[in-house]
Amino acid sequence: MKPLTKNMWRETARSKGRFIAIILIIMLGVLIFVGVKAAGPSLNHSLQKTVTADKLSDVQVTSTTGFTKADLKAARQLKGGQVESVKYKPVVGGRESAAVALYGYDSSQKQNQLSLRSGHLPRSNQQIVLDQRAKTKYGYKLGQTYSFKKSAGLVHQSYRIVGFADSPRYIDNASRGAANVGDGTVRYFAYVRASQLHLTLPTMLTIRFANLQSRDTFGSSYKDAVNHQVDQLKRIFKDRSKARTASLQGTRLAQFAAQKRQLQSQLKQLQAAGPTTVGAQGQVKRALAKLAAAQAKFKGATTTAYDWQTREDLPGFSAYGDSSDRIAAIANVFPVFFFLIAALITFTTIMRMVEEARGQIGTFKALGYGKWQIARNYLVYAVTAGLIGTVLGVLIGNTGLPRIVLALYKNYIPLKWVVRPQWDSIIMSLIFALIATVGAAGIVVRQELNEGPAALMRPKSPKSAKRILLERITPLWRRLSFNRKVSYRNLFRFKSRMFMTIIGIAGGTALILTGFGIQDSIGGTATRQYHDIIHYQATVRLKLAGHESKTDMLLNENNQYYSHTTVASDVGEVSLNGQKVTDVNLTAPEFAPQFGRYVSLLSTKKGQKVRLKRSGVVLTQKMADLLHAKVGDRVHVDTTDNHKGSAKVTAIVQNYMGHYMYMSRFAYQKMLGRSAPFNTLLVRLNHQTAKQRQSLAQKLLDGGGVLATSYVADQRQSVSTMSKSLTPVVLIFIALSGILSFVVLYNLTNINVSERIRELSTIKVLGFYDGEVTMYIVRENIILTIAGIIVGYGVGNLLTWYIMRQAATAEVIFPTTIHWLGYVVATLLMIAFTVIVMLVTHYRLKRINMIEALQSNE
């Protein structure tokens, strides 16, 4: 082995702490950069593999009157589409009288295959397979009897539970969608043999396109292709609903009309006969009322309507995609900042190491070694540290961190893990790691080699001390002890060291604070939306606008009921200058003065209350941003029931979830050219348990003339689930940020001690005790730690704000929120790291060889 190489390895062994620290810093930087970048794609790829293996359909269509053979033949006109028919109906069942999504099991079906968690699939007519959620949340067990309500209309009322399963239709364990039975919220799904459902025709079509299965289910390419197929399918079925309705109704409507005319004729004759026929007139009127009710019921049962669903519309599917998108958005900011801190500290460490070795460089130069031979020694050291750190970071980050995230993603069905190398991130991290190590070594070696051997073998002259600002404050300066004066002077004497320590500590504090801030900001969305903006607890949709007497009666009978207000509620599309926003909730209160008790309309600029005017509309914040709208612009509105209009924007108000357009009843009529249909109640309730909410919703649905009831508590739970889904990633951020902070602090202190070993040995020779020598260094660390923590608070807030802006979705704004716990944990961790480093430094300084450190190189 050549002398230069031997010396390099000897020096590496002698200062192995520094070498390991460099590797650790690079490893942590690469680990979180590559690992977090891989987490989002791994979540998407894993779900893609899971739903592909279970053959999840791309499109689902349900019909109110079922699908005939002609319908199936029409659907099969779609090129490349595999069409299957399914018997499906929402029913009420179980000991908790829950709304259940009931499917007819057919072993010949290829799509939407169940994944058994225990037991087996139905083998006989009185066997049932339940959702795994029915077991984990509602306590059902194999072998138990499961009973449905009579209204379910099944061959049998009771079935034996023979299995529990997961379905690719329901990937989110917390959500099973909505239904028009029970309390309106589906609790779980169930499968019995198809023959057990009293349905003459299948009520659902599932369509799967083989050529789309290789595309990313969350990618724009897949979504565009599926939407194109849905548009084609809608064109095919455009006339089918009318034809199907006509075939079912036949001549029955004409019979109803004839009976009505006959009864009306009788009524006229009786009225003409005089007051003696009042009793008979009442009978005819009652007959007319019964006839009208029977006709309405018949029309409702025979009118064909289709409901179209893609994967995006399935419960929890979009939320899963949004969650992985948020991780990807966070990965574009947090790991980059993390890696920059790691690279900066590594750069400084390598530079200081080479500067310390100037004596050796001078010796080798005097012995006749060439510049390249000497430089190669340090470049190999830098490359070795950089490559080892990068390889370890890539192996742990790309393979380990996504698996940890997938393992902790417990809100979803078990996924088939897919973790692929993120080559672009790996290559980028390798380049940055080598710049931080080899680049630093190359810059300093080049500078040092420009000097002569004699100059290099002598230590650099120490920096001369200068008066600092504190010295000019004479009353304060006089009261400081000698040791404190020396510490303050040294801080400003070595400015680069001071700034690097502050940057290192501030970066660590900011990263830990940002980890907490991400979680708090996402969780704080619900608090801002449903405490500061929304003050009602439930929305009740009426079957007929203006008919709320039954609903009022049921609400007033409820002990938790407080008050309600009536609004006209529509859904539509709003556009401006080529930009458009869909699924906008149009709301016009019947009584504007009391609306403020239910919804706070606060301006985005000054937070002032906004009043609804007789003309013009109020937009919410996110929608205005997407439309690039400002006060005074005229927006165009197209509702889902084909009413169109335009209105001037009078104000933009705060809102954090969803899109809303508020207006007075007069502005509604002026914009859409019709009177506002007051079809929704905003209800204020006192605290309710989940059972009380379920009971009220079921009563309203059964006898209150209500289509659906939705609770704010359920929406808050969705936000909570969204926040919890990011918990694994946030915990990883906090843990790795803490480790990086400790390594950085230790490394910088180690450099500080190494550079000032002669100075420390001198004061020790002069009679300073071990504790005083340690405090000579630690006092500076304490000051810099405090400064770094304070700076870190500001940087952490800025970083959290920026990440939350990047993570915002088309419908959600995340307010920048960091609770006190984040500040406390970040501060305590930094203090704990400082104390640990102080103890390690104290132990090292006690063992200083003063003679060796003070010997002259002259």
Image (tube, grey):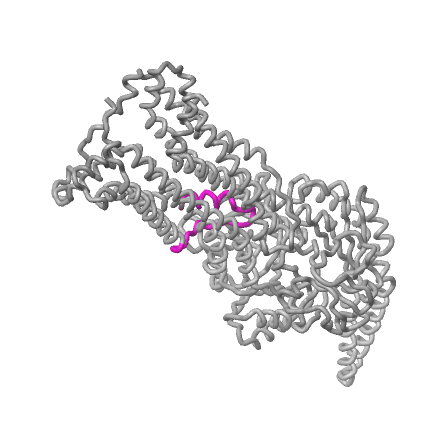
**Front position in the image: 346 or 330:** 346
- Would residue 403 appear left or right of 467 to someone viewing this image? right
Residue 247 x %, y %: 86, 59
- Residue at (35%, 16%) from the top-left corner? 367
Give the percent coordinates (x, y) of residue 314.
67, 54
The quarter of the image holding the C terminus is: top left
Q: Locate residue 473, reporting x and y percent.
A: 15, 40
Residue 832: say if magenta.
no
308 vs 496, nearest the viewer: 496
* Residue 256 shows up from this direction: yes
- Dividing the picture into quadrants, the one containing residue 101 is bottom right
Task: Tell me: residue 459, above or below residue 505.
Answer: above
**Residue 651 seen in the current view:** no
Magenta-drawn segment: 797-821
Seen in the picture, residue 198 relative to 739 is either above or below; the reply is below
Q: Relative to residue 543, is residue 37 drawn left or right?
A: left
Q: Is residue 583 above or below residue 685?
A: above
Q: How many marks?
A: 0
Q: Residue at x 41, y 48 (%)?
A: 513
The x and y percentages for residue 498 are 30, 36
Left or right of 261 on screen, residue 547? left
Position of residue 21 relative to residue 697, above or below, is above
Of the pair 845 and 795, the residue shown nearer to us: 845
Toward the front, the furthest residue is 1
Left of 582 or right of it: where is 686? left
Q: Residue furthest bottom?
A: 276
Residues 498 and 758: in front is: 758
Residue at figure coordinates x 60%, y 42% from the top left: 41
